[in-house]
Amino acid sequence: MTEEIVNKICNEIFQVLPTEIIRNNVGLAGYVYTVQIGNDKYVVKISDDKNLILGSTYWLDKLKDLDIPIPKVIAENTSAFPYYFVMTFIPGKDLGLVYSSLSRDEKKAIAKSLINYQKEIKKLPVANVFGSLNSLDYAEYLKEEMNLNPSQEKAVKFYILVFCIIFMSEKGASFNQSEAAPVTEQEKNLLVKIFEKYYEELKAVADDKTL
């Protein structure tokens, strides 16, 4: 993704080009930019995966009426590439970037806030399934974005194999529900395809002892 695409999106939504574009180098799913439009800031999230955008905007809509500080969706495009949505900007820093510098009292305050947010989320209706699956072809994305070395790349692929097994076991379980979460034929076939792909890749380098 390039700033040229971000400029195009902003020009389409706001009819002006941003005066500043900052790439947010946190998170693993999609490309996220903070843009300055006049006196206001917005966040643009772009992805190759339409389902990622649909999922994000779906949950932002579900959570918007709860007492939780979440951004407002300004615009969304899932009809043609690049898939994206634009949301309002919430000031602050990613917790992962500042956590080690926080005091004990600050960490406690954050934990209390998270508990209150979770209580709010519990107001939503109980889902009738556990988890969902659309795509899991993330190894190449992680390799490119995080500059993984060969050992790290193999570790990611091994994690994907484990995830496939755990995901299917969770989908077939009932947890606290009266019936087990259904497993569709599409999910089954996708999991098998993913598992076989990365199993064969790891098997091909099984003699490499660097992992």
Image (tube, grey):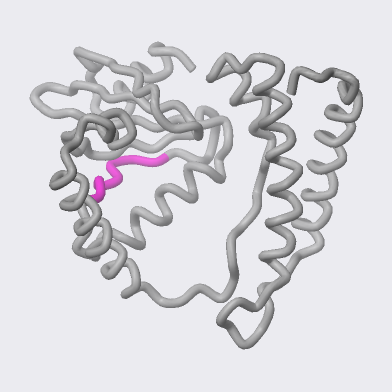
Quarter occupied by residue 41: top left
Q: Is residue 93 left or right of residue 202?
A: left
Is 44 covered by the magenta stretch?
no
Q: Is residue 97 above or below residue 103?
A: above
Quarter the C terminus occupies: top right
Horizontal side of residue 131 vs 196, given as left or right: left
Can residue 159 be seen here? The reply is yes
Name the quadrant containing residue 12: top left
Image height check: is 154 above or below 107? above
Region rendered in magenta: 70-76
Is 72 within the magenta? yes
User: Looking at this rendering, what residue extends furthest in the left direction?
Assistant: 39
Residue depicted at x 73% and y 26% = 154
- Which of 57/198 is in front? 198
Question: Residue at the location (88% across, 25% down)?
Answer: 206
Instruction: Write down the quadrant of residue 140 in the picture.
Output: top right
In the image, 92 versus 183, the foreground residue is 92
Q: Residue at x 34, y 53 (%)?
A: 60
